[in-house]
């Protein structure tokens, strides 16, 4: 076994490339901006110095709500040089979910683009630990109505050098690289503490798929593990990235062709969107040759044929456990399998007492690793949840799995109450909490229903208060002002009561999922095709 060393970690890799290949392009934005390895490394030091001047020190958590841009990665690596911990936040967060994540982080400093300042203003009085708000793109005359100190770009960067900061440290494999929020089970979202060693094992999967000399097309959000691992993997190989802030099906192939992109990490629903476009004579005339994809879409074979993709890898993982299952997709592909177990990981499929079940039988997947610090270091501020997930020395994924005699693993269902829509993990608990804030809602249950694009769509079944006439359009409009777009229910149905268990009075969601969409269900996408086209 090769032990992960400090020189394997992203900050040190960037420093090495800045010395060995200073003029090689690392970051390229579709807006035309280009940055070399040396420029990226120096920018990370500038950010470290600026943050150090703001009082950021080793072990501090710092919130980052910046978009998918050069600056968000400069800030991340800059924090690493200080031994501080980045806590990136979904740019769609607002209201109670934004308040909850800011409170849970206990951060004193937050990075926010000017566009999102109004969202922060709505909850600014309810987050007493937050002291300083840095707006790197702020225009003169930033709003002064926040109780926090607001710092614009001129004050933040004024006279800041690219010398090694006074508080510089050498990140170690066991240091926490970032905190990524993931869905709750029967509770709110959890902040997963990821060591640098876990990110290293993540990035190995991308480098193993893309090979050397790749040009990576990158549109994954920086608040997801996908955004982190692509940047890390590209730097590991000394390759280059072409960055677009968000996925765009209409810009995908023009970007790939213009910038010579050879590799992409992409999600199954996105593949399906690209396939939905009318065929063109030059579909196969593009430089893209390799891709990592999960979950696999039903028409993967057609996508690979139509666009001349030479190699595809698929995988299964979670923010908490990395990517323990990876395989090269066969032709024809085994769409049901999520791969074979990687070296360095151990997996079991167990019953409710953690006893293994026979091959072919469904149980819960639990995982551990041979190498220290290559899985999560627990949940931020949640010791009880951490202990429960790590019971008996194994991490409990909450996912139902089976394995065949040949060692192929198959995801069957979610034991946990989470949904996944367009690549976003969604806590049903949080959806239900926000729906129940409506004064005419007595009770609700959020469930996943299959989407025609793959993964899930969100459905809520709602019990109204007595004599209420609340309907789907009214409730949907009310939620639009309070809920991130990716969480908003597509389907709403009003029912007289929710099915409950006799002993514990818990909602029987399995029964609701089996029932699914009915003639009485209101469909937001059918009611508003324009809104549907932008989600």
Image (cartoon, rainbow, N blue to C red):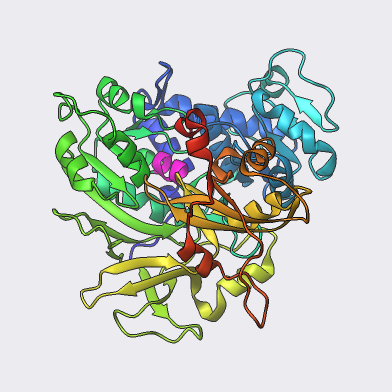
Residue 382: say if magenta: no
Vertical placement of 19 versus 475: above or below? above
Residue 228: say if magenta: yes
Say which quarter of the image contains residue 260: top left
439, 183: nearer the viewer: 439
Residue at left offset 51%, top offset 78%: 393
Residue 58, given in percent of the width and then of the height, sits at 67, 48
Apparent side of residue 227 relative to residue 273 in the rendered image (left or right): right
Residue at left offset 42%, top offset 66%: 413
Residue 396 seen in the current view: yes
Say which quarter of the image contains residue 109: top right
Vertical placement of 159 versus 226: above or below? above
Vertical placement of 215 versus 62: above or below? above
Vertical placement of 508 versus 330: above or below? below
Segment tinted magenta in the rendering: 226-232
Say which quarter of the image contains residue 344: bottom left
Dividing the image into 4 quarters, which one contains the N terminus? bottom left
345, 446: nearer the viewer: 446
Residue 409, given in percent of the width and then of the height, sits at 30, 69
Residue 191 seen in the current view: no
Apparent side of residue 504 relative to residue 169 in the rendered image (left or right): right
């Amino acid at each position: 076994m090769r032990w992960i060393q400090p020189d394997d970690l992203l900050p040190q890799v960037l420093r090495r490339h800045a010395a060995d290949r200073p003029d090689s392009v690392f970051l390229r934005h579709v807006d035309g901006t280009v940055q070399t390895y040396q420029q990226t490394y120096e920018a990370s030091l500038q950010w470290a110095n600026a943050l150090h001047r703001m009082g950021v020190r080793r072990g501090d958590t710092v919130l980052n709500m910046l978009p998918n841009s050069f600056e968000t990665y400069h800030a991340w690596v800059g924090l690493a040089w200080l031994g501080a911990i980045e806590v990136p936040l979904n740019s769609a967060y607002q209201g109670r979910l934004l308040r909850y994540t800011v409170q849970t982080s206990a951060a004193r400093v937050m990075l926010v683009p000017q566009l999102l300042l109004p969202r922060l203003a709505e909850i600014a009085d309810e987050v007493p630990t937050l002291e300083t708000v840095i707006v790197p793109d702020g225009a003169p005359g930033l709003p002064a109505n926040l109780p926090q100190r607001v710092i614009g770009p001129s004050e933040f960067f004024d006279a800041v050098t690219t010398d090694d900061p006074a508080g510089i440290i050498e990140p170690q494999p066991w240091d926490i690289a970032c905190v990524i929020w993931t869905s709750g089970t029967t509770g709110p979202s959890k902040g997963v503490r990821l060591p640098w060693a876990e990110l290293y094992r993540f990035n190995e999967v991308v480098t193993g798929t893309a090979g050397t000399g790749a040009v990576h097309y990158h549109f994954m959000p920086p608040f997801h593990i996908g955004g982190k691992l692509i940047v890390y993997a590209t730097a590991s190989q000394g390759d280059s990235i072409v960055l677009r802030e968000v996925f765009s099906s209409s810009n995908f192939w023009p970007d790939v062709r213009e910038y010579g992109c050879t590799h992409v990490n992409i999600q199954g629903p996105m593949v399906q969107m690209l396939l939905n476009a009318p065929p063109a004579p030059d579909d196969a005339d593009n430089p893209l040759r390799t891709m990592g994809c999960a979950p696999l879409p039903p028409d993967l074979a057609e996508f690979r044929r139509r666009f001349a993709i030479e190699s595809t890898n698929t995988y299964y993982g979670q923010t908490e456990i990395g990517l323990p299952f990876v395989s090269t997709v066969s032709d024809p592909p085994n769409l049901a399998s999520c791969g074979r177990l990687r070296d360095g990981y151990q997996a079991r499929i167990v019953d409710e007492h953690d006893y293994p079940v026979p091959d072919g039988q469904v149980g819960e997947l639990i995982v551990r690793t041979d190498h220290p610090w290559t899985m999560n270091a627990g949940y931020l501020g949640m010791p009880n949840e951490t202990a429960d997930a790590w019971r008996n020395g194994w991490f409990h994924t909450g996912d139902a799995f089976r394995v065949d005699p040949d060692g192929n693993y198959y995801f069957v269902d979610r034991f946990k109450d989470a949904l996944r829509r367009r690549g976003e993990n969604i806590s049903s608990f949080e959806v239900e909490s926000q729906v129940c804030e409506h004064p005419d809602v007595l009770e609700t249950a959020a469930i996943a229903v299959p989407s025609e694009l793959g993964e899930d769509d969100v459905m809520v079944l709602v019990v109204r208060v007595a004599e209420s006439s609340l309907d789907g359009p009214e409730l949907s409009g009310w939620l639009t002002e309070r809920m991130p777009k990716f969480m908003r229910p597509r389907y709403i149905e009003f029912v007289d009561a929710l099915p409950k268990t006799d002993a514990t009075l818990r909602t029987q969601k399995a029964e609701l999922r089996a029932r699914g969409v009915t003639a009485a269900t209101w469909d937001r996408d059918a009611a508003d095709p324009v809104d549907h086209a932008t989600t």
